[in-house]
Structure formats: structure tokens, C-alpha cells
Image (cartoon, rainbow, N blue to C red):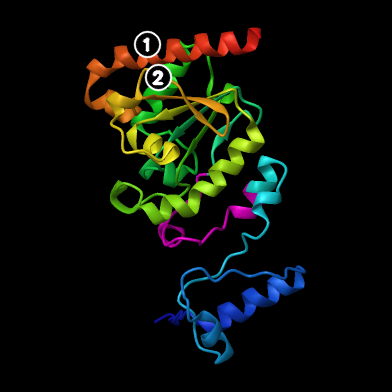
Amino acid sequence: MGSEKIMTFDKNRFFRNYLKRKLEAGEKTIYLPFDNRAEKKIAENRPVAVEPLAIEDFAKTETLEQLYDTIKDCRMCPLGATRHRFVFGVGNPHAEIMFIGEAPGHEEDMKGEPFVGRAGQLFTRALAAMGLRREDVYIANILKCRPPENRDPLPEEAETCEVYLLHQIALIKPKIICSLGRIAAQRLLRTNMTLGQMRERWFSLQGTPLIVTYHPAALLRTPDYKRPFWEDMQKLLSRLKELKSK
Ligand code: URA
């Protein structure tokens, strides 16, 4: 019989090594988001409940690459422990149009890229019909990690993660934002309005015009939504043209 290796996870050792790495890297601030008794536990050399994370200064990052490097190991909410991949966002860092969905699904979680599953493929085809490639626009989600069983984001998850998205928007400076679906729009606009109430009008997010349309998954479920979705996209393109001609 071959020798059997028994793996154990020693949180104290993990944490000591983590702190050592952080201190060696010259970092002074270490966040312990979930375990509010963590400080006492550390003082007593007892295990803490959640792996800490360095997210300090993410808001000071000046490029998407820097932002990504700063937040990619985020453990600020429990989804950090269940994700396969951190789904930061893709596209042109100077995109004129930014699309924002809800949260990664299974395919996105496995690939680390938003909107690559069945709904994403439909969305990519819709972009192509608008004369756009994925690389021309920017695509991101409210949450960067997949909620288990694709449930809706919890308010505390959205609250924690949304700050990253807002910083992403500030760095990209799109001319137009398009919210894909009700959940993302309700979160971004702090409203309980229905999708029907939000469609066909313009909102403003951080001074950027924002339009709300159907989530691509809704188009898969209800093909009748494809026509109004397409009308929304035409509206978006003509507003963009108008903005660029000013
Ligand atoms: N649904 C979303 O809202 N975002 C994705 O990235 C994939 C599916």
C-alpha cells in the first residue's frame, strides 16, 4: 500500500503565514470582515473564522489592472469562499458603452468571464447585430462572485461588492451604462420599480446616462422580449450618437 498523506488545514498557521506575507510586502492595514471577535482571537492565538483580505486602497487604484490585482482575492463576503473564479469584467477599458448584469452564473464562475453561458452567448450575438464586439464594450456584474444555485444577490453581498463596480465605472468613464435586467437596475438605482417601470426612460448613475433593458436570460425564456430589447438597444445607440455629436 502506498503511503497516505493526511491533509489538515491549520488556520492558525495559515493566518500567521498570511500576516507574514502581508508584513513582508509592507502592508499596514489588514481587514477582518466577518469575524467581529477576530482581534481578540488573534491576540489569544485562536483561529479566526474567515481568511482576511487585503482590499485596502482599492479606491485609489488608477487602472483596471491595478484594481483587478487589488481585489481579485476578495473575501469580503462569503461568496469569496465558494467561487471558482473571480469574475472581474471584460472589454475595452475605455468603452463608450458599459453593460452591467447581476452576478456570474455557473459558466462564468468556471471561466472567470461575465456573460459566457447560454444567455451570454445570446447577448454576444445581440452585440454583433448592433455592430459591436465584446471587446468594444465593457461587461461586468453587480457581484464578482457566483451566488450558490444562482440565487439573487443578497443585499449585503451587493453592498459589499458594488463599491468595486462603482470604481470600475469611474475608471472606464463610459458614455452610457446599460443595466441588463431588473435586479442590477434596482440595485444601481436604489429603487423597487419594476422592469416595466424602468424601461424606456433614462436614468443617471454618477452623472452617466443609464438605460434599463431585459436580462438576456429573460430573452431565452421569453423570445417575445427580443423585439423590445432590440428597441432598447436602438435607443441606446442613438443616444450614444447624439452624445458623441455634441
Ligand atoms: N447573468 C448575469 O447577470 N451575469 C452573467 O455574467 C451571467 C449571467
Q: Return the x and y of residue 147 as percentages of the image width and height.
A: 36, 51
Residue 69 belongs to the span the image colors magenta: yes
Tell me where the magenta segment starts and ends, as one range: 68-87
Q: Is mark 1 within 8 Å of ligand 1?
A: no
Name the residue at 23% across, 27% down.
221
Q: Of the residues shown, which amino acid type is indicated by label 2?
A: Arg
Name the residue at 37% across, 11% down.
231
Residue 70 belongs to the span the image colors magenta: yes
**Among the 4 quarters of the image, the one containing residue 193:** top left
Horizontal arrangement in the rendering, residue 146 relative to residue 42 (left or right) = left
Image height check: is 51 above or below 56? below
Image height check: is 123 above or below 42? above
Q: Secondary structure at mark 1?
A: helix
Kindly identify which numbered label has been placed on residue 177: none
Horizontal arrangement in the rendering, residue 59 relative to residue 114 (left or right) = right
Horizontal arrangement in the rendering, residue 226 relative to residue 124 (left or right) = left
The residue nearer to you, when weighing 208 against 217, is 208
Q: Which residue is mark 2?
A: 201
Q: Which residue is mark 1?
A: 231
Q: Of the residues shown, which amino acid type is indicated by label 1?
A: Glu
